[in-house]
Image (cartoon, grey):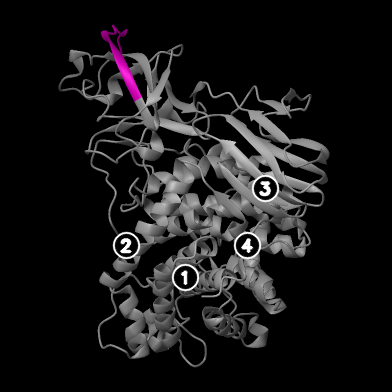
Amino acid sequence: MDHSRYDLSFTVDVSGSPHARLNPVPLGDVRLSDEFWEPRREINRKVTLREQYEHLESSGTLDNFRRASGRIEAPFRGMYFADSDVYKWLEAASWTLAANPDPELGEMVERAIDEVEAAQEPDGYINTYFTFERKRERFTNLRDLHELYCGGHLIQAAIAHHRATGSERLLDVARRFADLVCGTFGPQSEGKLETADGHEEIEMALVELFRETGEHRYLEQARFFLDVRGRGRVSGSEYHQDHLPFREQQKITGHAVRATYLNAGAADVYAETGDEDILHALERLWHNMVTKRMYVSGGIGSRYEGEAFGKDYELPNERAYAESCAAIGSVMWSWRMLQITGEARYADLIEHTLYNAVLPGVSLDGRRYFYQNPLADDGTHRRQEWFGCACCPPNIARTLAALPGYFYSTSEGTVWVHLYAEGEANLQGPKVRLRQRTGYPWDGDVEVEVVSGEGEFSLMLRVPAWCEEARIEVNGAEADIPAKPGSYAGIQRRWRPGDTVRLHLPMPVRLLESHPYVLENTGRVAVMRGPILYCAEGADNPDAADLRDVVLTPDAGFSVGPHPELAGMPALHAPASIESLDPGWRGSLYRTRRLPTPNRRPYRLTLVPYLAWANRSPGPMQLWLRSG
């Protein structure tokens, strides 16, 4: 396998986009060596991707391609969009190969591509659900059957494989399909189908294919799919984001994954075209999401019905849907907004969502997954090895595989540091090698050293929105540089090898409260330390018969210590109390209100990172705790 194209392994290539402020850094140029992310990425490479390949085999998903090519005779198995699971796996494996040559994984990739390539029809069409008996039905039910969604994931996988390996095998398959799409969809006046898919994905895929090939009609096709939405051509419903033209939408609605994928695609279109109405719509929708329709974890999608956003402040805890794929869609959207604007609020949400909404979706051993991510549980919600609808596992895998590409950006004369973890980065503009030393996210001290390269440039360090008293030192001396929470602190100077900047981010335990309209959280608090959200599990609090009875005092003094069962992750301990339920409630659901007579006993509460819950024996979990 040819690894000579590492310099092209951009996960999202806005390097030539005229309306993007920042430039990407190839993920192969960022090497993590920390004790938080890199062990998870190694598990992703050595365990997760290999076991997912076996699941794709045992579930019949790869056999669907063999069936389509005539290599086997068998019935179709799985969901009608099962092809996309193979494509997401291929993307995850390709990004992994971009940073870590792995001959065995490379062979698995080539075998999977063999099956995909053989299943493509002469006109470029490929979707194994529509092979043979359903051939006449293709492109007849775009609202429900996800043909363009699957095609979008094929394109993204092909681009990742091309950038990682230099091979054009899968890219040729993707281009043939994209050419068919361009010839099929468009204005009715041109004899084409004037509609879009019910599940967005193709938009950002086509823009990235334009970036990869220079073929302008792929960009125009993406813009067509964006513009045709909201005319009632799909369904006319909020569920499909088809209720209004995109530029007129005010609130983020409908299926949460579809919405974030659409917005990511719209951001890609803006980066190439500069259509200000698109950017204004994106900013409105993002603001609505983060201020009224997002969980404290960063999870989105509050309704099981339709895997959808609810109304403003509709954020139930135990019934939170908060699909893992939706959290990933949020990261993808915010990443594009960050590259367009350079605004720290987008990087803040990326960090928060990665730690607290994406990582809970996979077990610590990389073998089990959450589809939904509730914020309270009675012990019955557990991770699964695989799902009949298996969209989340390979989506998590591709996110972890591509993670190094999220850490840095560059712009003219400037290096931007978005995320923090021990490791090195080789940057080309300015040409410099940086080394990070830090115990983040458990420790808030970050040192950035110039290892090689010199010259004048600005170093932009993100000061997280959660940090109130950040300090900066340059070469050991306190620097009088503004370090406002939720901003980038800029240090401009002539740099030489050995120069160091130290960013001090104090991490006191913080108690968060909800907006008063989130009624379920009235009188409750959530606990955070640094970027990490915490929760209480029954496994650590066996003396609490019901975690809903635990009361945390606002001035509780927290202590921090390693958890022996969770790989030494810092656990929090605090004095609390357990309030016994009034016996008068026995046998009653409602009663005439009376003055409370609390009956409390002291209790020592243990909290663990929410990202690590449900990795031990089943038991209850509460994230929002009573306060008083």
Q: Earlier in the sequence, mark 3 or mark 2?
A: 2
Q: Position of residue 81 (x, y in %)?
A: 39, 71
| Amino acid type, label 1 | Arg
Q: Earlier in the sequence, mark 3 or mark 4?
A: 4
Q: Which residues are magenta?
A: 593-606
Give the distance between the C-alpha atoms of the residues marked 2 and 1, in whole angstroms.
Answer: 32 Å
State if disc 2 and disc 3 touch (CB < 8 Å): no
State if disc 1 and disc 2 touch (CB < 8 Å): no
Q: Position of residue 614 (x, y in %)?
A: 30, 40
Task: Tell whether position 605 is magenta.
Answer: yes
Quadrant of image for the C terminus: top left
Q: Secondary structure at mark 4?
A: loop
Q: Would you name the residue on which mark 3 appears?
A: 283
Residue sitting at x 35%, y 37%: 567
Q: Would you name the residue on which mark 4 appears?
A: 10
Q: Would you name the residue on which mark 1 appears?
A: 143
The local crowd at label 1, few if under 14, some if 14 to 19, many if 20 or more residues have their Cα within 10 Å, is some
- The mark lying in front, picked from 4 and 1, is 4
